[in-house]
Image (spheres, coloured by chain):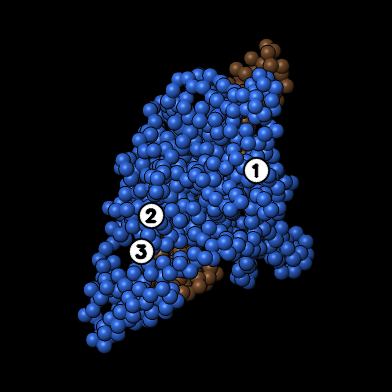
Amino acid sequence: MDHQHTHGSSPRELQMARSMCWHCQSEVSGEYFCDRCVKVQPVSKELDYFTCLGFPRRLTIDQRQLEAKFYELSRAFHPDFYQNKSAAEQTISLGNSALLNTAYRTLRDPIERAEYLLDLEAGSVKQIRNSPPADLFEEILELQDTLNEYRAAGRTSETESTLRAKLQSERNMLEQRQRDMEVALQHLFVQWDALQDRGEATSQARAERNRILKEMRENLSNRTYVKNIVSDLVSTVG
Amino acid sequence: MVRIVGIDLGTTNSLVAYMAEGHPRVIPDRHDRTMVPSVVAMTDNGLIVGNPAKEHLTRNPERTVYSVKRFMGKSLEDVRGELAYFPYHLTEQGGVIRIKLGEKTYSPPQISAMILKELKQRAEAHLGESITKAVITVPAYFNDSQRQATKDAGMIAGLDVLRIINEPTAASLAYGLQQKTQGTIAVYDLGGGTFDISILKLKNGIFEVLATNGDTHLGGDDFDRQLADLFVKEIREQHGLDLNAYPDHMQAVRLEAEQTKIRLSDELKTTALIDLPDGKGRYSKDLTRDQLESLTMNLVERTLGPCRLALKDACLIPNDIDEVVLVGGSTRMPLVRRQVEALFGKQPHCELNPDEVVALGASVQADILSGGTTDLLLLDVTPLSLGIETMGGVMSSLIRRNTTIPASAKEMFTTYVDGQTGVDIHILQGERELVKDNRSLARFRLKVPPLPAGVPRIEVTFLIDANGILNVSARDVRTGDTQSLAVKPSYGLSDDEVERMIGESYKFASDDLKARQLIEGRTEAEAILMATEKALKQGSHLVGEEELSSIRSAMAAVEAAKSGTDHKAIRAKMADLEKATHHLAEVLMDTSLKEALENKKLSELTSGR
């Protein structure tokens, strides 16, 4: 009874899937289900995670709303609810669920969310090199030396306790720095959202956009660098 | 609606449960016993399973298999350390353990299939219908190979395994249903052979697993061994006897160790008694609960590390946990309860029978899959990170542990040499840096068209489905062609082998095959008749007189065939009826169903109420 259309995944077919129901060929006006035959529709893999979860491309996200939407869509897509459906619908349910889970995981975490937005807006986020904050460069070099000295020092020696105290205070400083960077990142989030809300297309707005993205990229790259040093410190000094 | 049962395939005991009017129930046997011992014995009269097989543990130890779950999805090398504890003979073939029983060897999935068949028959006898579909539970920390082996066992037993579900999450479903719990809960599951900890968030019918951890080789068996080792040592010292030379007496020691441990959960002291071979009399040992606790403290402590890791992965501290739930027979031990209470700072729940709660939860999940329960949804995670081998023997992680499933990751592959026609891919599971420290899941060779180096672009998708089982597919980005992959499991039965085992399994059961087909036919005929009645009630005004009368006569024909004994005739009449109702079904689909659904917004369809 059921005509089962095999669902390919090349970009062109996906494009079609978005404009036409894979099952009854009618124009789909429903968001996730065909309005005519109520069959589940594949969420296009070209949709960004914000759109997929029905959120605007903003960096400040209400966690409760995000979770509520995730639960709502999980109920719509989860394979548990497609056990008695056709193979085609089961495949769509599986693909949609996997995409939804990735989207939620990415947007839930502020850092991953910011990295993802950078990737969307500026591309190649994977190529961000973890670099030390420019003003901390000297200090970090010195810290690396102290760490090496500490590792070489005898367990009970007097130098060890001096070095330990020094490393502890470095750790406190870096952890404070991490918190500062998080505050700065939050600030950038607000700036980004405000800029988007204004929706201007002036060259000034473009410059502002590029500045925010650049600062965000720097912030994330410094953050990862400092985070790695702190965890190195924690595992060495305890 | 086809019935789906829930099965707890345990290390020591197995159970089957189903949902009746919104309540999960465990199915007992004629003697009202709910647990089937997970024991299979080869006797002179053939294979026997469960309680009768248990009697053969001491009578016929070399040919009686217990705790087979410990060997699921494992190679001989993996279990070398504990081989001495098992009286039956293990070998290996194609990376899969084989158990020698008389002349033949059996893989762990085949032995498990015998237990599953026993449960299937029990359910069929109790419910008076044929059972072909099941949800089977596994420890949350089971890896891909162990899950696949469990699924294979179901197939060999003639069951369509609709879902592999994690034991602690199954338990949470049973508890959630019972108590309407909300908030963050920790499920501590210490069974016969495995330990799991799962942290979940329960909200409006959604059971979201935040993190899971565990040890698939830590359970009641290990507690028994501590006591058994002590007994064997003392018997050697006091009586000059090495019981290792007497497999039957070793089994008696193991069983007495288990009973002693169980007794010490209720009593503060007890006496273990073991008859010795060669007329050497009897060994007797007075034991206090304190003594047992100091012998097994290190085992209980081994469970606390995974608990802390799970909390850390969930970004929680013990104080954030609202409720702690105990699952598994081993949590009856007072020491375990005290340690869990100390870690989480609250008294754990144990209202539901810890032996039955997993099976009950599995039947709840079965009801969700069959469409009976619509307000609950379980969002589980993959317990271990999944990755591939990269240059220098390092694992590159693609899907991190504790990622909600279904989960997918894509990776692009290309070539390094002109004209290269293949890329070898090695899939791994685990948390360690180096390939050699992780679990090898499978290998396959990606076919690549011969082109200059770097030109081919093959996109491989790794998808972990809702069972926690990996599926791999590949697509040539240039041409858009998909590629079917021959993935060779590192520690599992090949598809061909499973096919063969299913065939063998049916050969043994060929006698009752006909009977089963008849029961199935009748059950399905009953279902289609009821569905047609219902459709007629809703839509008889939508079709013509002629059509109605042809539907009526097709129904009468099914009814007549149903009272006969030819399952083929039933099938034929059912097909005729389907044809006769084809148009009616379409009309109904277009009108009433559409109306019903159109008037509801998505949010209503999917909200918790």
**Outermost residue, bottom side:** B546
Name the residue carrying label 1.
B62
Which circle marks residue B1 in the picture? 3
Q: Which is nearer the eye, B186 or B312?
A: B186
**Outermost residue, top side:** A158
Give the vertical position of B569 relative to B180 (above or below): below
The reply to whether callout 3 and callout 1 are in contact (CB within 8 Å) is no
The reply to whether callout 1 and callout 2 are in contact (CB within 8 Å) is no
Work out whether disc 1 and disc 2 sit on a shared chain: yes
Q: Residues within 10 Å of mark 2 (few under 14, many from 20)?
A: few
Q: Chain of mark 2?
A: B
Residue B381, image x and y in percent?
Answer: 49, 47
Chain with colour blue in the figure: B
Question: Quick check: B342 left or right of B386?
Answer: left
Residue A72, image x and y in percent?
Answer: 35, 54
Going 74% across and 66% down the picture, which residue do you hit?
B421
- Chain A colour is brown
Going 50% across and 55% down the picture, which residue do you hit?
B117
Q: Quadrant of residue B88?
A: top right
Q: Element at badge 1?
A: helix
Q: Element at badge 2?
A: helix
